[in-house]
Image (cartoon, rainbow, N blue to C red):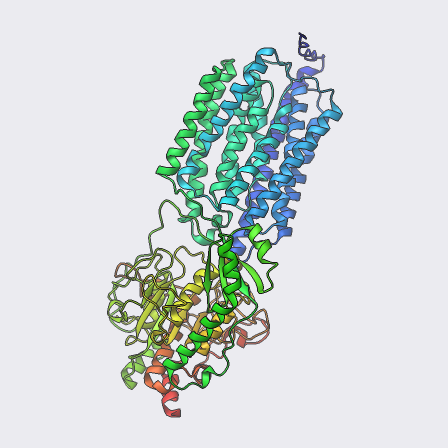
Amino acid sequence: MSVPEPPPEPPRPGPADGWRRPVTILLTVLVGLWVAGVLTTGQAAVWGAEQLRAMLVGRELPGWAWLLGSALSGLLAVVPALLLALVPRLPTARAAGRVWTRAVVAAVALGAVRGVVDVSRHELYLVLLALVAVALAVLFRAVDRWVATRRDRWGATRRDRRADGRADALGLAGGLAVTLPWLAMGALGGAGETVLAVAAAAAVGLLAATVLDDLLPAHGSAWVRVGVGGLVAAVALTAIAAGTGASGVALAELLVLPPLGFAAAALRAAAGRARPVGWLVAAATAGPLALADPQETALVLGFDDAPRWILTAAVASLAVGLLVDLGYALSLGRGVVPRRWLAAALAGVVTIAGVAVYTGAGRPGTYGDRLFVVLKRQADLSGLDAIGNRDARVRGTYRRLVDTANSTQAPLRRELRRLHIGYTPYYLVNALEVDGGEVVRTWLSTRPEVEQILDSPRLRPIPELAPPMRGNQPAPPVPQWNLSMIGADRVWRELGVTGAGIVVGTSDSGVDGAHPALAGRFRGGDDSWYDPWSHSRVPVDHGGHGTHTLGTAIGGGNVGVAPGASWVGCVNLQRNLGSPGRYLDCLQFMLAPFPYGGDPLRDGRPERAPHVLTNSWGCTQLEGCDLRSLRPAINGLTAAGIFVVGAAGNSGPACRTVVDPPAPYPETLTVGAVDRHDRLADFSSRGPTPDGRTKPDVVAPGVDILSALPGGGYGVESGTSMATPHVAGVVALLWSADPRLIGDIPRTRELLRTTAGPASAPAENCGDRADLIGTGLVDAFRAVETGRGAR
């Protein structure tokens, strides 16, 4: 039996070391703080820029921005770390420098993965993350073999080696304990995505163990190893956390991993090697990677949505991590290593607790994103506008769309069923929403009938939904300024037209069907309400936005433009992040309503379609849409004689910001916003569209608009969302005043544009003045009066 060599003696201090040692220690502390601060700040800054861009224009941050941010913060951090590894005479300082240099290199390499993969391609990101982490671990080990002679730098004894198995179990138990809050508050993605997240976490754990294998020299007491080593490990784990996780998930990792530094040092000291650290970091990393969707860290959801629960889980993990730190430091730091059976039992107890938390308080199941697959062939809708009878026209449109979908999708549907891949067929756009990730995407891209494959994000459930907005103001006693500004009250008073006989359809966050301004105007029946999100049977508003916009279109109580019209509704935005499929669910319902539980392709009732649609939403790139994605849907609605009104967006004052479907389409009557002084609102999106079209078409009041809110009250909101229902209400007045206009889209658009009044536009060069205000401020009285006179 060989006898292990004794640990090397620490170097004896020379005469000049009296003042150098404290200076070196101070510099080491400052370098550690600098490395942790730079990497944390860099990650937060790039994520903040991404959120700002998402809220302003609904676009992801370009990949080069992530690459630049990772490279810049890495360069600022690696230089002092590398100098620390080479210059000081103090072995502890050099060891810290070596560990931090490797950790920063790892942070840069892992962070660069975000720059080459879109946030929506999470499975691909996880694959690359795992590959890069393993490659770095192999590289670092190869460097160790080249530099050193594989001498045990910690001088481990035979007792240390026997502690390996126990320390492994303790490392796993500590990491699983840190994951408990994520099991309670988070939700898994798809099955494949979950497996890849666990694999990526394991790879990050392997990388962490490799980086921390050279944590400190062998000399010094156990308390020194744990205390000083814990600080060194915390900085290294900060660097690794900064590079781990797409988008805002890395911010969560920054709260989860660094607090485990002392536990990592204690495990390293007890085992004589860093393998238990790998178990600790892998289990802890898996929580955010597997149970938080990076797309749902976006603040466009609102802080009270998924961001709140992700932050809560991360802070709870931090607290658990500190407790693990304390327990392991007090026990392992004193050399007390539990027996093998006790360590295994601890890991088992934490595992059982995790299962209980997940099945009891958590949200069991998988909630993977889907793919929106658009086929090459779209329905031929030519000639439908020549059909004089409205019901026949809508029925003909519906029939052509459904027949095209059924015939062209049949081969692909058969293959999906054979492969046991779930799907939802659509007809208003000839497309299918398909379950699956990167493997399914690759297979679908080989199919000859497929034109494009878009992402269709699926929100994961959260413990508690944010409450809807509530109104705290009473119903106004007289028509509001915005109604008088466009002459709607004059239409009621002087022309006797209120919108009677016209049905307005709204697709939004829902509608408070019990609100006094709206309750009496609901069309009723079993085909006037559809909620594909929560499957409510009666009208309900999940956010408040939909009640407010519909109130402006047709509400009573002196807030609605066409208070005599009725309405039908659909929920396309339960939590402010939609998808092509969810938006299309509602647009199909508007073309051919169907009863609860009905099949849109079989049970549609096109003769029950509303006349006018108000759409205060836009399908952004973050939600999976591109400029073409919903164009066939708006074409189909227009072919059926249904008037589509859409919001320009709130990305002003920048030019070329009318970008999110359906606003850029020529078939959409696109609306910008002005204030009570006829001035264009700063937030109102400007044209031209990406394909050079002049937008918006008209403007309407959209600043400080009083309307209905859930709970029976009223409140003030601003946005092009508030301007859009004004125009939908004017169309209802027009068609109510002269039913011969119903379905005549070109004539109605002409009336709205040519009768619009003046509006003030700022001195901006967005191509043309019309790209700011269209033809001007919509004028309900002139439009209705002109429409009547022209007939």
x and y, in percent, of residue 106 in the image: 64, 36
**In this picture, residue 606 sits left or right of residue 111:** left
Residue at left 58%, top 46%?
125
**In this picture, residue 210 sits left or right of residue 343:** right
Residue at left 42%, top 78%?
396
Which image quadrant for residue 517?
Answer: bottom left
**In this picture, residue 227 sits left or right of residue 101:** left
x and y, in percent, of residue 9 in the image: 68, 11
Vertical arrangement, residue 47 with respect to residue 757, above or below = above
> Is any part of residue 511 visible from this angle?
yes
Image quadrant containing the C terminus: bottom left
Vertical arrangement, residue 282 with respect to residue 485, above or below = above
Total of numbered circles in the picture? 0
Which image quadrant for residue 726?
Answer: bottom left
Image quadrant containing the N terminus: top right
Vertical arrangement, residue 7 with respect to residue 542, above or below = above
x and y, in percent, of residue 564 in the image: 28, 76
Q: Nearer the viewer, residue 131 or 738?
A: 131
Q: Nearer the viewer, residue 710 or 157?
A: 157
Which image quadrant for residue 499?
Answer: bottom left
> Is any part of residue 668 visible from this angle?
no
x and y, in percent, of residue 96 in the image: 64, 25
Residue at left 50%, top 34%?
256
